[in-house]
Amino acid sequence: MSEHTHTLATLDWLVIGGYLCAILGLAFWLARSQHDRIDYFVAGRRIGAWPVALSVMATQCSTNSILGAPAFVAFAAGGGLVWLQYELAVPLAMIVLMLFILPRFHSLQLLSIYGFLEQRFDTRTRRVLSGLFLFVRAFATAVTVYGVALVIDLITGLGFVTSVLLLGAFTVLYDCMGGIRGVIYSDVLQLLILTAVLALVLYTLVVDAGGAAALLDSFQPERRRALDFGGLGIADGQTFGFWPMLLGGLFLYVSYYGCDQSQVQRMLCTENARETNRALFINGLLRFPLVALYCAVGVGIGVYALNNPGFLGQLPATETGPEVNLAVPVYMMSSLPAGVVGLGLVALFAAAMSSLDSVINSLSASTMEDFIRPLRKNEWPEHQDIWWSRAVTAGWGGITVGMSFFVGDIAPTVLEAINKIGSLANGPVLAVFVLGFCSRSISGTGAITGLLLGMLCNGLCWLYLPDLSWLWWNPIGFAVAVIAAGACQRLMPGRLPSASHEGVTDATDLPSLAPSQRRWSGLLALWFFVLLAALSVL
């Protein structure tokens, strides 16, 4: 990389320092309104739909996405705008969630969604699912910290250890003090900064290319195609075909948004189910434009590299060639003025923090509610509850930051395979919750057996079916888990839920659809077809 890409002006450092101090100030100010664990973990259930929706969007817009998606669009073999068809599943997933899943959770007034599993099945099922969440999310977060710290180190020259500690310390500190309210409002600020910086970068790329029309004309035609109906992803090696991305993505998103504590916890911060559904609607509507923005940056970066042959030579070299995942920050540092470069790095910090803060808070919530509090025979005083929650949050922050120092040898593989790892469990986890909602006959033993066999089946697909798109693992794991749970129940009947919990298990107990649910679901369905039509003309 050329020397100037390592150098930050004093103004850039002032911008970065001012942003970090502002985030900490916000967290300490919000800490004044925390009185108990309800305030700390679900903000007293008084957050509006817009902040919740934007916070969830910010979490999805991680540093890996900001760096990886443009690189996929611009440089990856078989890449291009085809990534956008993955987003078609989001509006459909939001419809499923607002009609069938989130209203149930909201009616139970949960802090940990795995509490539902204890009500429906038993304590063991609750702890198995919660433990699986803790393990997968902590590991993935450590890998994220490792990857982001490498980027910070390469750009700033601070060193890997300093970069890890800087990112981890600020994120953990404002997370501990601000609680979920601090997470949500800082995420909103971070998303606004990130969107503004991406829009500025896209503008400069368009100007450099001679206009939007010239930019698109210069982009390789095969990469402009956004829909790929050419493969099913079953035995053809077409991982990113239309059907695996739509159907596999639907199961993935329903599971992630509806059965993952890190996502659902913020949805439970709203006052009622109507506001939760409104947040889902906003997310389903705005997520695609956000992803389209950083994919458009990828188009611009690809054209810029084509018009400036020396650009790729500025990127750090790897064994397989230039590190194209750093193309966006290297472009920012070489093309944007002082101060704006600092704002661009703030955007990268924001993307990383918005992914880490919500995960760390949700790890704390699950640990407290599913493991620590059940061990207490008496209720804690409110102030003790808050400090225990903060201590557990700090503990998880320390664990994830500490683990990031030990994933170096495997991180490059894991970073590429992180979606695969999630897809091993997404379908089976969704199956456990669906069985809890819709079946009276499945016991906890059957549910856990289905979960394990579903994950095992997906693992075998990974090992022995390399030409099967990993996106298909999500519906396959779901189907195997449901079938295995039913078979296990027939072979080894277990104790069924008590009568006091039957209301939770009966699918017919779902409240009748409100007019807003019908209206928002219809609008999201229409939005799906609008997006499909728009992608078909690219």
Image: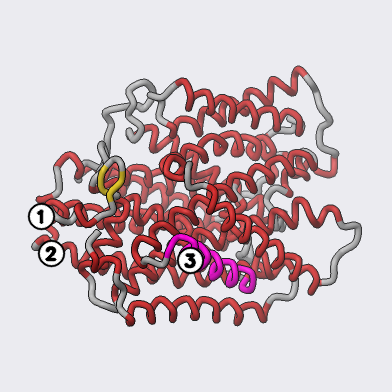
Instruction: Name the residue tied to disc 2.
Output: 208
**Residue 47 percent across, percent down from the top left:** 59, 70
Evaluate if marks 3 and 2 touch, with contact meaning CB atoms under 8 Å apart: no
Q: Classify residue 467 as left or right of residue 489.
A: left
Q: Earlier in the sequence, mark 1 or mark 2?
A: 2
Task: Tell me: residue 120, above or below residue 141.
Answer: above
* Residue in the picture at 32% in, 51% down: 325
Q: Is the N terminus in the top left, top right, bottom left or bottom right quadrant?
A: bottom left
Instruction: Name the residue tied to disc 3.
Output: 162
**Residue 158 percent across, percent down from the top left:** 41, 67
Q: Give the range drawn in magenta.
A: 159-178
Q: Nearer the viewer, mark 1 or mark 3?
A: 3
What's the distance in space between the residues labelled 1 and 3, CA to CA?
Answer: 36 Å
Q: Which amino acid does label 2 sit on?
A: Asp
Q: Which of marks 3 and 2 is nearer the N terminus?
A: 3
- Residue 307 got which mark? 1
Q: Earlier in the sequence, mark 1 or mark 3?
A: 3
